[in-house]
Image (spheres, coloured by chain):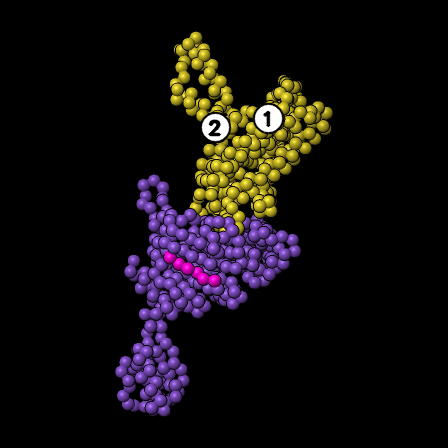
Chain colours: A purple, B yellow
């Protein structure tokens, strides 16, 4: 869906100021069917990358392909829906007029256009009643929903959302998260940037972490967190009898054992079998994306 | 292509029509046209000629103000408010945006000029003056002059700030009306300067700048036949057609440059 090779973007400021190297050789691939989270601190290059993909910014160098075509080619955006960060729309239009406008630009007309307006509005949770009001009276959440609806109006094969949860209340964030999951389930490729790392950990199939204009990590959540594994937590349904535990395993209380390596976890499982101990729950203890991101930011 | 451009044009039209600044300008212009009746009464010249001359001037100036303020705002607002991001991320080339906006504003100007024209003719009719059909020729060329100015406003607003764009566009308007006169004046001084007091001369630089202005900036005096129409002077045959072609050529060139520039720019 999206292939980015050695993408560089340098902003040349006015007069004698130093150039700003926004993107420093980015390589990234978003595959068909991915629910791809793009994370990084403010000013790391997330929005710039997205804008280059959509042809809104011109790459200084590198190759960017969208839907099999060079980024910037209008046809590359034919089946792509886009929601910008903090979207602004024509406040003199009603929500319905706005969706009609974008639908027509996407090539829809007649009955199909009306049908898609209703479908995309419903999908984004945009109420038909307030769609008849002018956008200048909309709250942030309502604008975000109309923004999502316009991104979905042409039934896109891929959507690119730039911080779709920005400024939303917890319920709004939840709705957007559910929408992303639903789109993914229905086969739409989702590429979105966000600061909400807990959501990324919970729903994304793949992620990329960008810091200071460079991709620092890319892969599944577990691959990205990978070497931040913090062992395994085992909970017993009965108190642990006194006795010697395998190496690298220690009790946190009578019911909980922490094994710091996979080998020690296997040792403990044998130990539990020998002792006839019933295991109620066992889970890997991972570091969080936040930890990994903090570590990468600290390297800059 | 046609659907996308007409959609953008219709939206630009709707945006402008729903903007209060437009109504203020139209009401102001209609008020001034009414004022021409008073001026006519006061004038020592014939009232009819004063009403016609003044009203055509009001139409021209109000058209200029609309072209500058609305024309610059149409693109600048999209860039500053970032509404252009969502629009340009749709599967359309960027030049659709420029051409669509341009056509939308032309439609607005057409309707405004039509309203003023109807008002003008109504005043002439009810005032028992002579509603000469030749006035329509002058109004037609006012419209084409505004079409050129809108194109210039779009060009400047595609890369400059609103204030600078307004200043530049106004500069082109003034230069466009004066460039012919300046060139004639230079030719006169070159020919007769030695016989004039103080022996004035024209430096090659001054002449070069005057010639560049004349050839690269549309000569807007070509669109001004108001005096000829009001004072019953003859207008050359095919003048309207030739001036229309002249205006269209400049509009085409200016829009082409605007589209090329707009195609290169980054949208942050």
Q: Residue at x 50, y 37 (%)?
A: B256
Let me know if residue A65 is in the magenta part.
no
Above or below, A1 against B31 in this view is below
Could you tell me which chain the residue with mark 2 belongs to? B
Q: Quadrant of the C terminus of chain A?
A: bottom left
Q: Is residue A266 left or right of residue B245?
A: left
Q: Residue at x 53, y 38 (%)?
A: B71
Q: Position of residue B56 (x, y in %)?
A: 61, 27
* Quarter of the image where one finds residue A39: bottom left
Q: Residue at x 59, y 44 (%)?
A: B2
Query: Label 1: how many residues lie within 10 Å, few (<14), some (14-19) or many (20+)?
Result: few
Residue located beneath label 1 in the image: B242
- Taking depth in this image into account, of A87 and B155 the one nearest to the observer is B155
Magenta span: predominant SS is strand
Above or below, B149 against B228 in this view is below
Q: Secondary structure at mark 1?
A: helix
Q: Position of residue A2 (x, y in %)?
A: 44, 57
Q: Secondary structure at mark 2?
A: helix
Residue most extreme to the top: B195
Residue located beneath label 2 in the image: B216
The magenta segment is A27-32
Q: Is residue B152 shown to the viewer in this render?
A: no
Same chain assignment for discs 2 and 1:
yes
Query: Label 2: how many residues lie within 10 Å, few (<14), some (14-19) or many (20+)?
Result: few
Q: Is residue B232 shown to the viewer in this render?
A: yes
């Amino acid at each position: 869906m999206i292939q980015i090779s050695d993408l560089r973007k340098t902003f040349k400021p006015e007069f004698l100021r130093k150039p700003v190297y926004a993107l420093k050789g980015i390589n990234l691939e978003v595959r068909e069917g991915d629910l791809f989270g793009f994370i990084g601190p403010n000013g790391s290059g997330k929005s710039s990358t997205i804008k280059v993909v959509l042809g809104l910014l011109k790459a200084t160098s590198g190759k960017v392909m969208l839907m099999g075509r060079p980024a910037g080619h209008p046809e590359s955006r034919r089946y792509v829906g886009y929601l910008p960060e903090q979207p602004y729309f024509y406040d003199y239009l009603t929500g319905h007029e706005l969706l009609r406008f974008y639908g027509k630009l996407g090539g829809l007309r007649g009955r199909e256009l009306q049908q898609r307006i209703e479908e995309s509005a419903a999908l984004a949770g945009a109420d038909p009643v307030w769609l008849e009001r002018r956008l200048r009276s909309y709250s942030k959440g309502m604008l975000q929903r109309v923004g999502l609806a316009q991104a979905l109006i042409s039934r896109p094969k891929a959507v690119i959302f730039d911080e779709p949860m920005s400024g939303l209340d917890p319920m709004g964030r939840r709705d957007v998260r559910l929408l992303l999951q639903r789109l993914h389930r229905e086969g739409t490729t989702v590429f979105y940037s966000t600061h909400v790392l807990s959501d990324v950990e919970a729903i994304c199939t793949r992620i990329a972490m960008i810091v200071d204009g460079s991709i620092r990590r890319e892969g599944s959540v577990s691959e990205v967190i990978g070497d931040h594994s913090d062992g395994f937590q085992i909970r017993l349904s009965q108190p642990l009898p006194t006795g010697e535990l395998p190496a690298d395993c220690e009790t946190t209380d009578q019911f909980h054992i922490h094994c710091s390596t996979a080998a020690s976890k296997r040792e403990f499982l044998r130990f539990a079998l020998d002792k006839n101990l019933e295991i109620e729950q066992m889970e890997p203890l991972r570091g969080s994306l936040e930890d990994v991101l903090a570590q990468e930011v600290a390297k800059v | 292509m046609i659907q996308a451009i007409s959609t953008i044009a219709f939206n630009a039209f709707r945006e402008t029509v729903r903007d209060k600044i437009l109504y203020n300008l139209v009401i102001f212009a209609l008020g001034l046209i009414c004022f021409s009746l008073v001026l006519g009464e006061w004038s020592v010249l014939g009232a009819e000629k004063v009403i016609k001359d003044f009203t055509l001037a009001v139409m021209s100036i109000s058209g200029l103000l609309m072209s500058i303020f609305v024309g610059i705002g149409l693109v600048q607002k999209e860039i500053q408010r970032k509404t252009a991001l969502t629009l340009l991320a749709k599967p359309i080339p960027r030049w659709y945006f420029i051409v669509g906006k341009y056509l939308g504003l032309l439609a607005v100007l057409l309707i405004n000029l039509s309203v003023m024209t109807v008002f003008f003719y109504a005043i002439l009719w009810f005032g028992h003056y002579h509603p000469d059909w030749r006035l329509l020729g002058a109004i037609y060329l006012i419209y084409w002059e505004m079409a050129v100015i809108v194109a210039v406003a779009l060009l400047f607003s595609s890369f400059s700030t609103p204030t600078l764009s307004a200043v530049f566009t106004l500069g082109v308007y003034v230069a466009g009306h004066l460039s012919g006169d300046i060139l004639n004046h230079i030719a006169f001084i070159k020919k007769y300067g030695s016989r004039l007091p103080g022996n004035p001369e024209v430096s090659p630089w001054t002449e070069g700048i005057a010639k560049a202005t004349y050839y690269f900036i549309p000569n807007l005096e070509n669109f001004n036949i108001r005096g000829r129409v009001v004072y019953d002077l003859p207008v050359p045959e095919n003048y309207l057609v030739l001036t229309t072609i002249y205006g269209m050529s400049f509009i085409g060139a200016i829009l082409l440059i605007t589209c090329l520039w707009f195609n290169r720019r980054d949208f942050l």
